[in-house]
Amino acid sequence: MGISKYDTALTGYQWNNINGANDVKLLAPILKAKGFKVTTLTDEKATHKNIIEGINKLIATSQKGDIVYFHFSGHGQPVEDISGDEADGWDEAIIPVDARKVYKKGVYEGHKHILDDDLAPLITKLRTKIGPKGVVYAVLDACHAGTASKGLDDDEDECPSRGTMQGFTFTRGKYFKPKRLETANYYKVQKTRQNSHVVFFEACRPYQ
């Protein structure tokens, strides 16, 4: 999955265009050459609905012992945690093409964001499906990477793996920026002998 052009009609010109779809174009032939069956979602096809359906289809078609590669290149954002399971008060989210950056009651309330709380159970189902002899590789390239091609928002000078320092918040004001987010760049990984191994690769700050 990769997004270069965000849907301005749906998001209200809230996200910069980046080069996420290019990653898919480069990676797909390499994976196919290695024997992978590749399904892609890019730009306008990478909606919240299609991404979730795509992951569920991946789970349904995977077999015991498979090596599964999951990739997302696009924007990311911290989202105010309302479930109480985050030590720093913020969830991780990847941003589909039809998600807005700012909360507006009755218009957009975060329902198109894909949180770590949404991804974790799906990854767990996938790991269970392929079993202990399988491996899941998950690559989340959702970082602005400073002056690199991802493009930094004009009012931002930090580059967390979430993609923007402007938090999506329900209670703290339109342009609230969380304090340091370094403690939150982790996914909850269930450890069990029945599940496959899982390897996460996440984009980092420019100096890493």
Image (cartoon, helix red, strand yellow):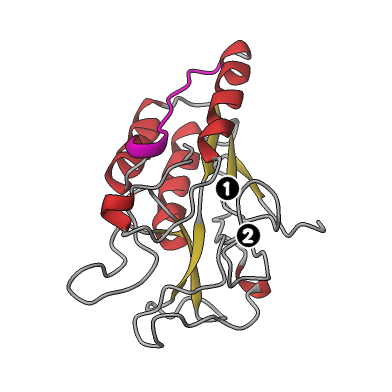
Report the magenta residues as a range: 35-44
Residue lying furthest left:
106
Residue at image coords 51%, 34% = 21
Question: Which quadrant would residue 99 be assigned to in this image?
Answer: bottom left
On the image, the x and y values in percent for residue 53 come to 30, 39
* Placement of the C terminus among the 4 image quadrants: bottom right
Amino acid bearing label 1: Leu
Report the side of 112 relative to 138 (left or right): left
Question: Which quadrant would residue 65 be assigned to in this image?
Answer: top right
**Mark 2 vs mark 1: which is more N-terminal?**
1
Structural crowding at the residue carrying mark 1, measured as other residues with C-alpha within 10 Å and reported as few (<14), some (14–19) or many (≥20): many
Q: Which residue is mark 1?
A: 140
Amino acid bearing label 2: Ser
**Camera-nearest residue between 204 and 34:** 204
- Whether residue 66 is visible here, answered yes or no, is no
Which dot marks residue 151? none
Dominant SS in magenta: loop
Residue at image coords 33%, 51% = 8
Residue at image coords 56%, 15% = 32
Q: Which residue is mark 2?
A: 161
133 over 87 or under it: above or below:
above
Residue at image coords 53%, 80% = 177
**Camera-nearest residue between 62 and 100:** 100
